Amino acid sequence: MSSTAAAETRPLTAAGRVNLLGLDEAGLQAWLTELGEKPFRSKQLRQWLHQRRVFDVDVMTDLSKGLRAQIAEHTDCQVPSAVFDRESSDGTRKWLVGLESGNAVETVYIPERDRGTLCVSSQVGCALDCGFCSTGKQGFNRNLSAAEIIGQLHFATQALAAEGRDRRITNVVMMGMGEPLANFRNVVAATNLMVDPYAWGLSRRRVTLSTVGLVPALYRFAEHSNISLAVSLHAANDRVRDEIVPINQKYPLAELLPACENYVAKTPHHCIYWEYVMLDGVNDSLSDAKQLVKLLSHIPSKINLIPFNPFPGTRYEASPRDRILRFADVLQKAGFIATIRRTRGQDIDGACGQLVGQVINRRNQGKRGATPAKA
Ligand code: SAH
């Protein structure tokens, strides 16, 4: 990475210091090289910061005194803090994580018998305005820095440890607020740290990015990452998808599907995880299910049907359970692995599409229905 590129991505704190937490291996190496230090120190620093979660330079005794002085002088490690915390009756935890200038995003922890999944936000709000998602309704303020994204893992790890219960983060899904591929560089740096053996060390199978399908960014992502990919499909034809996922008007299915196939071909994954929210009378008929079978027949796929979580002001309704089951049955009989997502944390508005945070909107003055600009 050139030093210019590193400087551009380098996250600064409000005091103008480098927030070391947001630098991945390449970013740290570039910063160390500028200081005249050996790039291999990056490995020690990642271990201190992300494995031992020690931020006090005086404790980092395997680094030279000179480097420790530079770290003390030029850097900070800022972990966001919670302004609000709720626990669902099913054990799901939701934190409202405070950021600078009055914004806040939501981070959700979902405990299961054999794993603990952290659902991480990538933007304050979202600019894409999918009609059935309450995050979109909040408008958009800004991208999170890489430090603010990885900071959600630091924060949640600390919070869970402080409770003394055996709750670990084994999986991360970039399925919180925002469209991760619209915040490309910061999301790549943060997810690099998640799978980095000298940082969080999670398996790339256990870190999943979910995208609405920004086609050019999806091709770039295949060159920069190899974590699991989930794609919010939600419709089997452009007519329905144009309506419920407006970015489809810019990147229709005929462009999205090859970009997804490219990701599977370029990375060591066996399949794409498709997300399909079940909306009553909109996309849940048997003919929709058959179209979906045809659409995905040539792509290695797992399909996750998501029961719609309603929120105030929405014009959509959830599909009845028996229709979801019949839809799943069509997919399964055609040979797909199709699952129905168990809704978690609904009583604390922590479920899919219910995350709203605290967004000072800077786009569309909070209006709904504004479609993204065409290319
Ligand atoms: N912007 C990314 C990341 C958000 S992930 C994306 O679109 O994939 C959140 C997932 O929950 C997406 O699949 C989204 O479409 C889905 N979702 C949004 N609102 C929902 C709602 N009200 N009920 C159920 N699922 C919803």
Image (cartoon, helix red, strand yellow):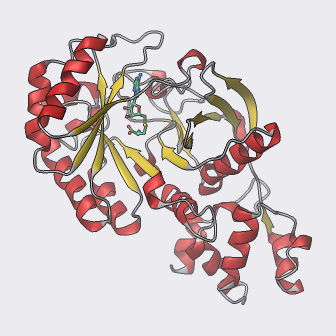
Q: Quadrant of residue 124?
A: top right
Question: Going 7% across and 38% down the picture, which residue do you hit?
Answer: 294
The image quadrant in which ligand 1 is located: top left
Q: Position of residue 169 (x, y in %)?
A: 62, 47
Tell me: residue 17, above or below residue 148.
below
Question: Going 55% across and 35% down the picture, which residue do you hit?
Answer: 112
Question: Going 85% across and 78% down the picture, which residue do you hit?
Answer: 68
Q: Is residue 65 left or right of residue 199?
A: right
Q: Is residue 229 left or right of residue 183?
A: left
- Seen as rendered, the residue at the extreme front is 113
Q: Position of residue 197 (x, y in %)?
A: 58, 70
Viewer-nearest residue: 83 or 154? 154
Asked if residue 299 can be seen in this view, the reply is yes
Tell me how many marks there are. 0
- Seen as rendered, the residue at the extreme right is 58
Tell me: residue 167, above or below residue 34.
above
Question: Going 65% across and 30% down the picture, which residue do you hit?
Answer: 93
Q: Is residue 41 left or right of residue 200?
A: right
Asked if residue 375 can be seen in this view, the reply is no
Q: Position of residue 244 (x, y in %)?
A: 27, 25
Q: Position of residue 230 (x, y in %)?
A: 35, 45
Q: Quadrant of residue 359?
A: top right
Viewer-nearest residue: 316 or 161? 161
